[in-house]
Image (cartoon, helix red, strand yellow):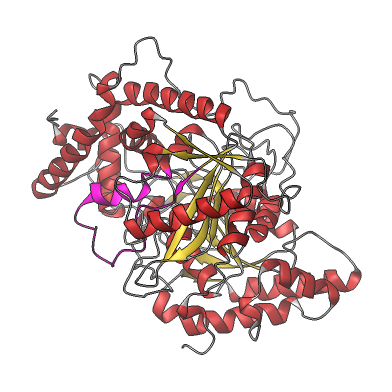
Amino acid sequence: MSDLADLTLAAAAGGLRSGDLSAVELLEAVHRRAAMTEANLHAYLTLDREGAARAAVGADAGFKRGADLGPLQGIPVALKDNMVTRGLETTCSSKILAGYLPPYDGTATTRLRAGGAVILGKTNLDEFAMGSSTENSAYGTSRNPWDPDRVPGGSSGGSAAAVAAGSAMVAFGSDTGGSIRQPAALCGIVGMKPTYGLVSRYGLIAFASSLDQIGPLARSVEDAVAALEVVGGYDPADSTSYPGAVPDYRSGLESGVSGLRIGVVTELNGAGIEPAVQAAVNRTLDQLENAGATIVQLSLPSVEYALSAYYLIAPAECSANLARFDGVRYGLRRLGENVEEMMSNTRAEGFGPEVTRRILLGTYALSAGYYDAFYGQAQRVRTLIIRDFQAAYEQADVLVSPTSPTTAFPIGARTDDPLSMYMSDVCTIPSNLSGDPAISVPVGLDDAGLPIGFQVMAPALGEPVMFRVAAEVERLAAFGVRAPLASSEVG
Amino acid sequence: MPVDIDIAKVARLARLALNDEELAGYRQQCEVILEHAALVQTLPTEGVTPTSHPLPRTNAFREDVITECLDREEVLAQAPERDGDYFLVPRILDEP
């Protein structure tokens, strides 16, 4: 490959260790790519050139000393701008946090630094991670490297666009209802949401605490594994962190799918899915069957209610979490006659329309007289969804579906109709409600040349079997195509 | 089923100073979304325990060890207004 910016993480890590390339060269290549693509894509809110240069020099010095800090040493990594970074502006794409310089690093960031990663900067997102297109950013929309007139998906749209375009080798995002997997699908890359609790949420600005999970966006399944290895594991700073040992993600990557039972979720396939997307998923299923897997059709009836339950639970948790943005300790302040007015003026001006809408929805769902009928009922439905998943995993090792019902849609197409935007996440939301891991792997293009993602879901801590199937899907699909804007000749 | 929201009350509870036009817009959108969300009410859930968290844990303890804490100056530097080591806010109680 002619340009270092197009290397997979695994290939770059090999080159760094053999001495064929340096972290500084790698960073320069990625910066050159960003200089070519950013005007079109707007994947980044902040590029930290000095910090990245320092980290790259440090990584090279480490390699010279023979210090191996793991798979991300010297690798240029981008972070979604809802992951706090000490002294580096962190806005969540919101006006309410304009200019905010966090006084600490989140745990994932701390582990990345300790692992020698070169942190490039902060990527664009839908404000407070609420959205499926990055159009809800207060700082402009990111664009899809496959077609700049279309959205990159969201909310981790900046991270997905950067990885697809080569302006980051790997990136991290957060996934509350599909915010890693859906943009990965729309940008033709791999995106993975770990089991709830596997990656610490300390320093991830909270949206919906029982659903949020940090995870990687990468150019291959193996790259996603490497990225997860560095950030995962118990953290005493997050009381919901999983205290047990982290599973061995790599063991099954080469094992294939022979003998595995792959469950096709009836409710997430067929109806409401674009024909080209379903056709690509069905083709992949045929390939998996030919490779020795047993395909079983499984119905999870309560999954039909997942979107409805999610749009009560997520706004309810958001309305509580975002109460902290009150103009007292950080961010924007707009004056008023008294404290309450100051807070109300600050919040009305600081939050954009989607965040305001979700705070209102959540406040309503939690308010006296409506709590049980809305929030309480949604929590009971969540229990039924978890039971359906548990029953399904008695009959299948993994479950599969399209990641997104459609390919990338045109900018502006869904902004006036919140409900149609919410439908983007119909296939990804169930795994957030159940807390289980799920991954999106690119498997083809539609007639317009836009990527299609295939989702593999697994039971809690089932990452090894999930990665095993995903790696086989990747081999069988032989996707291998790169976003037109990632090609080095295009400026 | 139709949902009827007292949007001004909800906005007050959420500490959002919205004007009448904004309130009307949000009311209409929230009602459409809540009508869809109200689908959850059609599922029978008698005797089903609500899930507040996917992996239930209680009493997550850690060792009580002294670790580095946030730098006070760095924290206060982010305050919209401060008075020495305090966050400054508009007067809360009336003049005596």
Residue that appears at 47% across and 41% down: A264
| Nearer to us in this view, B93 or A404 | A404
| Nearer to us in this view, B60 or A196 | A196
Q: Position of residue A143 (x, y in %)?
A: 38, 71
Instruction: Find the residue positioned furthest to the top.
Output: B47
Looking at the rendering, the stretch of residues picked out in magenta corresponds to A400-428
Q: Position of residue A213 (x, y in %)?
A: 53, 44
Q: Overall secondary structure of the magenta stretch?
A: loop
* Quarter in which the C terminus of chain B is drawn: top left
**Quadrant in the picture for residue A318:** top left
* Quarter in which the N terminus of chain B is drawn: top left
| Nearer to us in this view, A231 or B23 | A231
**In this orientation, does residue B29 appear?**
yes
Residue that appears at 64% across and 55% down: A471
Residue that appears at 38% across and 57% down: A277
* Circle count: 0
**In this orientation, does residue A99 appear?**
no
- Left/right placement of residue A238 relative to residue A412 reads right
Q: Is residue A252 magenta?
A: no
- Left/right placement of residue A97 relative to residue B57 reads left
**Quadrant in the picture for residue A352:** bottom left
Q: In the rendered view, would you say A353 is above or below A163?
A: above
Q: Is residue A422 magenta?
A: yes
Q: Position of residue A261 (x, y in %)?
A: 59, 38
